Image: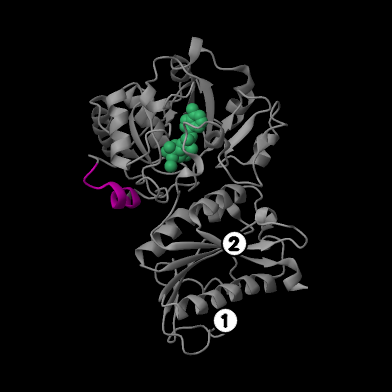
Amino acid sequence: LENPIPTISQPHTQKVLEQAAQLLRDGQVVGMPTETVYGLASNALDSVAAQRIFKAKNRPQDNPLIVHVSSLKMLRSILKDNQIPEVYSNLIRQYWPGPLTLLFPRSSLIPNEITCGQLTVAVRFPSHPITRALISTCDRPLAAPSANSSGKPSPTLASHVMDDLEGKIPMVIDGGQCSFGIESTVVDGLRVPPAILRPGGVTYEQIRQVHGMEDVQVYKKHFTDIAMEQAPTTPGMKYRHYSPEAEVVLVEYIKSGSVSGSEATSLSSNSPSSTSNRQYDLIMKEIEKLKQQGQKRFGILRTSFTQSPTSSSLDSGDHRTRSNENSNGGNALDGSLDHDVIEFPLGQGSKPEDVARELFRGLRYLDDQKVDCIFVEGISEEDEGLAVMNRLRKAASRNISLEARDFL
Ligand code: TXA
Ligand code: MG
């Protein structure tokens, strides 16, 4: 952690990194891969460069940026009194470099444009070799939000960054698909007890295991970014997040006896397969209704395949299109199906890390297919499922749910 400059062996990659670093030193912004999602980077010590990020993304001026470092020395250089608070030592030892962002008392080196008036600065030490090499080559901490247009799903491929920002930024480094696919976990250890402000790549279950973090708070029931909720200068629920053009409908399972949607979860991780069929049937019924209202094309992000893997993968392995001609029988609609239903498999709900990796790609894929409405089969909120459901609640304009007694 003190001096971990990864070796980039390919001369071509090194050349690209030099180019990107030069742009960054000149105050430009660059799209870069990280292990979570693609980031839009600028020199974190340059206030004018930071403004370019806000402009390119059309980001609200009151939403602070995360600063990325490639060594603890670099971290200390931007902290108040150059001190790393003791409360973070175990978290840092166990989860850095990685998808974990921590809040620190800021030094005046970090411009206001980045922290948006907060007294703290959010810092992450990414594990992606390209990100780390870029920070090291540039020899400056890099401010970087996700590299999407504000409000859109975060990018997990370089092409997603191009789709949103082409013409607005000079360069994107292509590092392939992001391995986590969902943003970092944001932890505020400065408050007592510590709190997870945004669930992400490092799970609540993992953080709770860290010595000193046993009491960490997580807002499972309300799915709000408490940082944003409690600090009026950060946007929170004011803004829609992760939203494609199409309406997003989240399909959940509600435990019998719970009064509100707050207990919602899905059965996909621990249920007989018949319940996933019920989830799917509910979507099909809902599609019928929307069809009568004039909607034509529908997408489903699936987490509960009951089909064999071979029948669930077509050409690119991405999706299946259901219609009269190629409906696969069992779940067919009423025979007079004249619209398309495009399915995109996110992975099994019992493997939330797979769902997390594919989630934003799936939302973007279905949006490109110009569907009117995207249904998502919700998953259990354990492990990475908590971050997945947090993002889905922000993307969804409504929920439909099944109650446990429907299955009895
Ligand atoms: O994985 C990630 O964190 C990605 C990659 C690029 O590193 N970045 C990312 O940045 O997701 P962004 O800007 O999309 O999300 C940053 C989150 C926002 O919810 C913001 O409000 C919060 O971090 N944040 C930043 N600084 C903060 C601060 N000082 N106090 C509270 N929340 C803060
Ligand atoms: Mg973002």
List the residue tagged with mark 1: 331
The quadrant where ligand 2 appears is top left
Front residue of 94/262: it is: 262
| Residue at image coords 29%, 42% | 172
Label 1: state its secondary structure: loop
In terms of image quadrants, where is residue 20?
top left
Badge 2: how crowded within 10 Å, few (<14), some, or many (20+)?
Answer: some
Q: Position of residue 37 (x, y in %)?
A: 43, 44
Q: Is residue 262 above or below residue 7?
A: below
Front residue of 378/241: it is: 241
- For the C terminus, the quadrant is bottom right
| Residue at image coords 43%, 31% | 64
| Residue at image coords 63%, 21% | 87
Front disc: 2 or 1: 1
Q: Position of residue 396 (x, y in %)?
A: 51, 57
Q: What amino acid is found at the position of numbered circle 1 in the picture?
A: Asn
Q: Is residue 214 above or below residue 284?
A: above
Left or right: 313 as drawn, with respect to 40: right
Q: Position of residue 30 (x, y in %)?
A: 29, 36
Left or right: 352 as drawn, with respect to 143: right
| Residue at image coords 45%, 15% | 107
